[in-house]
Image (tube, rainbow, N blue to C red):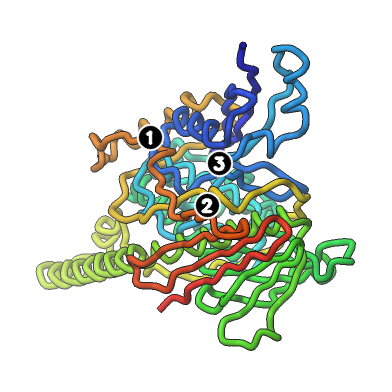
Amino acid sequence: MAVELRDVLVLLPTREQLRLVVGVQATGRELFQQVCDKTSIREVHLFGLSVVRNNEYMFMDLERKLSKYFSKDWRREMHQGPRRCRAPFVTFLRVQYYVENGRIIRDRTARHLYYCHLKEQVLRSQCVHREEAYFLLAAYGLQADLGNHRERAHVGRYFEPQAYFPQWVITKRGSAYILRHAPAVHREQRGLSPKEAVLRFIREACQLEDVPVHFFRLYKDKKEDRATIVLGLTLKGMHIYQEVNHTPQLLYDFPWSQIGKLAFLGKKFEIRPDGLPSARKLVYYTGGASSSRHLLQLLRTSHQLYLRLQPTLRGLRQLEEEQEKKCYRESYISDALELELHPASSGDSGDSRDSGQRPSPCLSLLSANSQGSSLGMEPGEMSVDGSLGTEALHGEVPSCSSSTSPSSRDTAGGSRGWQERDARDPDPEKGRSNTSPVTKATTIVSHLQGPSGQVSVQLSVSSLRLRDASVVGQGLCGTEVASLSPVP
């Protein structure tokens, strides 16, 4: 019997498209494996496949069949012959877990996709009190995409403001203002390698409140017609916003260390702050039990990754601070020696010395806030079991750069430009064994079948000497609780 096939269109963070063919009984993992093979991603643990439900991204459980996430037309074709439908089913390759330091991502392809995803997030950012940050981010993006500013080549409209600035900045300042002043900031990045420009872009973008965050709409009570609460899953915890006159206002900022338990019962979703009496819990409502399960799953795995990355992030911060101090010390000694040897020299020599790479400012790690930009989720079938595993990440990262590419281009052709630029930046990890990207991510959730159908999911982080996090569920309509370990 011939296997029925389905066309799937996968949209990448680079605005490129992949057209893939899978069987009608295929799981999310089979599709994800094809995406990883086509894009040559080796580190896959930060990415996931998602579909849109009511203008909100829902990440797939890769162990479940794709039919759970697409319309009924996916199965309907089974009884209408082997002909495939014309319109493909659409899914997105997106960043599922954010990290604040790009050096954690060792794979150049993965880091390039991560960078492109953040660029798209920056274009939708609304931090009006951080306008100067968008000019700096545009400079890093131009340096990563185009290299050093060249006076003869980079004149006039050598870039499109819409590709590097949010629309509200363009509306406020005008394209002429941006095209006149952005090149000066780009020029200041002379000597910065494409790899370092990407790393600085990632660092600065993750300091904006509404960039490294997932948004979920919640209802204040179950009789409410429109969701007015926005939960933002950030790098270091959760933010709760309430919409007032269509403008989100921050109500609560919960780092992971201050969240005791997260629980849901059907549509009811509870947040219990650590150290407070149970009467102080926050109660909201989702669009359905499946939405609650999806939210709880993402919160739990994000917390797990946060705990696992802390030793690595601390080591990277110390290394960067030491390198920064060394750069400043060497610069000071060089200036002192030159003053002694050439006391009558003019200030022109200083300009030539500064033409190289300048030391980077101190790495600032701010909590990622959130702002409501996504709308409510329609209930869909989702299981808390079979989560996407995460890995402990560490080590130095190879180089990466990116290039501006038009939408809907062939993946191999669209990626050739930045890969060739990377060829000039040696990759210390060449020759590393190319393990299957899907099987490489180790699942850190074990499933145990208990009495009376009770399922216990234990998230072990014993290697970090932290109190284990656990989840207990009793079916779709039962209560599920996630106990989150405070960071010591």
- Residue 450: image quadrant is bottom right
Q: Where is residue 316 in the image (x, y as percent from the top left)?
A: 31, 63
Q: Nearer the viewer, residue 362 or 190?
A: 362
Q: Which residue position holds label 1?
A: 436
Q: Which residue position holds label 2?
A: 138
What element does badge 3 sit on? loop
Q: Mark 3 vs mark 1: which is more N-terminal? A: 3
**Is 112 left or right of 370, judged from the image as shown?**
left
Q: Which of 436 and 399 is in front in this view?
A: 436
**Is 464 left or right of 48, judged from the image as shown?**
left
**Which mark's residue is nearer the viewer, 1 or 2?**
1
Name the quarter where the N terminus is drawn: top right
Residue appearing at x 58%, y 62% in the figure:
299
Q: Position of residue 368 (x, y in %)?
A: 55, 66
* Residue 62, label in figure: 3
User: Within 10 angstroms of label 3, few (less than 14), some, or many (20 or more) residues?
Assistant: many
What element does badge 2 sit on? helix
Residue appearing at x 25%, y 65% in the figure:
323
Residue appearing at x 42%, y 73% in the figure:
467
Residue type beneath disc 3: Leu
**Could you give the CA–CA distance between mark 3 and mark 1, rounded to whole angstroms?**
15 Å
Name the quarter where the C terminus is drawn: bottom left
Residue type beneath disc 1: Ser
